[in-house]
Image (cartoon, grey):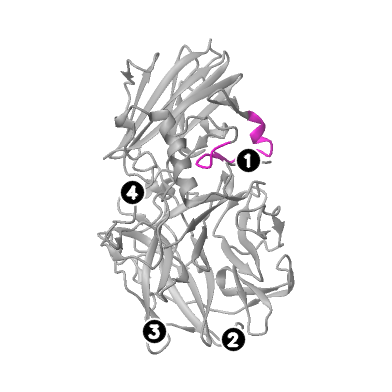
Amino acid sequence: MTFPVRPSRLSTAALACALLVATGAAIAGDPAWARGIEGQRQADLGDGTFLNPILAGDRPDPSVLRVGDAYYLTLSSFDSYPGLPLWQSRDLVNWQPIGHAITTSVGSIWAPDLVLHEGRFYIYFPGRTEVGRSNYVVWADDIHGPWSEPIDLALPGHIDPGHAVGEDGKRYLFLSAGDYVQLADDGLSTVGEIRHAYGGWRYPEDWVVESYSQEGPKITRRGEWYYMITAVGGTAGPPTGHMVIVARSRSIHGPWENAPNNPVVRTASRDEQWWSRGHATLVEDAAGQWWMMYHGYERDHWTLGRQALLDPIRWTDDGWFVAEGGDLGRPLAKPAGSPVPHGMALSDDFSGDTLAPQWAFYDPAPDEMSRLSLGDGALTLRGKGAAPRDASPLTVISGDRGYEFQVEMEIEPGAIGGALLFYSDRLYAGLGFNGERFIMHRYGEERPARLPAGPGGRLWLRVRHEDHVMTVHHSRDGEAWDKYDVQMETSGYHHNTAGRFLSLRPGVYAAGDGRVRFRDFRYRALE
């Protein structure tokens, strides 16, 4: 399965122009749609400070890597493909997309680790299908690609691999539950048996958490010490569950001793701005300041998914460190470095000849891209399934608490075209149309249960999501709009309701027989 994306080798100035072109063509002359078109809240406050999140929306399990004066980042992509999104920055706060590292589906992708070893980039990650799970690696000699096909490391019993090089010069992969295994010198297979290295850290029994779930090991070498950063407490569930745990050892093989100030990060109260904070990676900036990057849920906005957060740390005289950012609800001094244009446009006039990087299919089949074509200012999708749950919708990640989007649809006879807020095949809401009748999607169910084949036709849909309420308007000409008579409350459309660790995303779908041509997808944040 090949998912081409737009070229990623752009200078800063060229990328800024590309972002403007990608969004501006669709909204020129329409000031109402010119606000918030990037769909990415700006972390940089412009006065030498920043406010979390640094990457808004569903950006879980961030793995960050510094190479010279540049930083690179990848994240969990779960059921969305293209997968393993890649971002670059010069200051850890402002980020721009540079592509994806995987197009071949290995199932739901969790908790990757991005590393550079002897001039080659590697990403280690777990993948899970209905059949089972394993851990994989992809590699590239250039961060922009091309990336290899995924290589199965035959590690079905663990998740969250973290790469390390020992004092013996050998490569190792640390895994969930405190285990580790040696890697071959090329990093593409394992050597010997899995061994147990670390027993974890136990929180007080009366703390309100989801589960113990020792996971996400990331190894950093500083001086004579190896530091292992892990997460316990469960990554969702109660807001006070997830946390950052630190242990250290002079040898990669242990013994590992726990930090006296564990947990170094934890949400202590649901009154804080950020919930379930954890799963951290350490990185040092150009000025020698150290940082933790991890994820968290925004208070009362589980639907946005786990967002990427940046927390300054301070090393203490005894060789441990403390987090300095508090609950991350206030502006913090920026890291060293020069900013780049931040964010990714979500609006799309479909003028390109490849799928733009903001789009991803949900749970695609190996031949999913054969459904899609671009040309004449339209994205054309061949129908699949009968409803969003089995139609592999195309979605974008929104980081805004409130937003609107609209799209024009040209629906062939027999097809159904629609716009929706999509969490997973179990939970979504929106509206579809066959040219004659509407089909309402709510709670992941349909009313009517199934639409018969219709005559097709043209329709514009506008979806507004504000204060967890979804409102849909429709139009036959793009000028006169009618409100659909059902509004939908979506505050429960998240992991704690339906699992999967995903987010509620704007999207479009094509179902039934025939094709749907989508034109002029416009997105704006609500001020």
322 to 51, vertically: above or below = below
Q: Nearer the viewer, mark 3 or mark 1?
A: 1
Residue that label 1 marks: 4
Graded by Cα atoms within 10 Å as few (under 14), some (14 to 19) or many (20 or more), the crowding at tag 2 reads some
Q: Nearer the viewer, mark 1 or mark 2?
A: 1
Task: Name the N-terminal-most of marks 3 and 4.
Answer: 3
Which percent across, then down, holds residue 256? 53, 84
Q: Nearer the viewer, mark 1 or mark 4?
A: 1
Could you tell me how far apart the alpha carbons at marks 3 and 1 are, in whole angstroms?
49 Å
| Depth order, front residue of 270/359 | 359
Q: Which residues are magenta?
A: 355-371
Residue 367 lies within the magenta run: yes
Residue that label 4 marks: 301
Q: Nearer the viewer, mark 2 or mark 3?
A: 2
Graded by Cα atoms within 10 Å as few (under 14), some (14 to 19) or many (20 or more), the crowding at tag 3 reads few
Residue that label 3 marks: 260
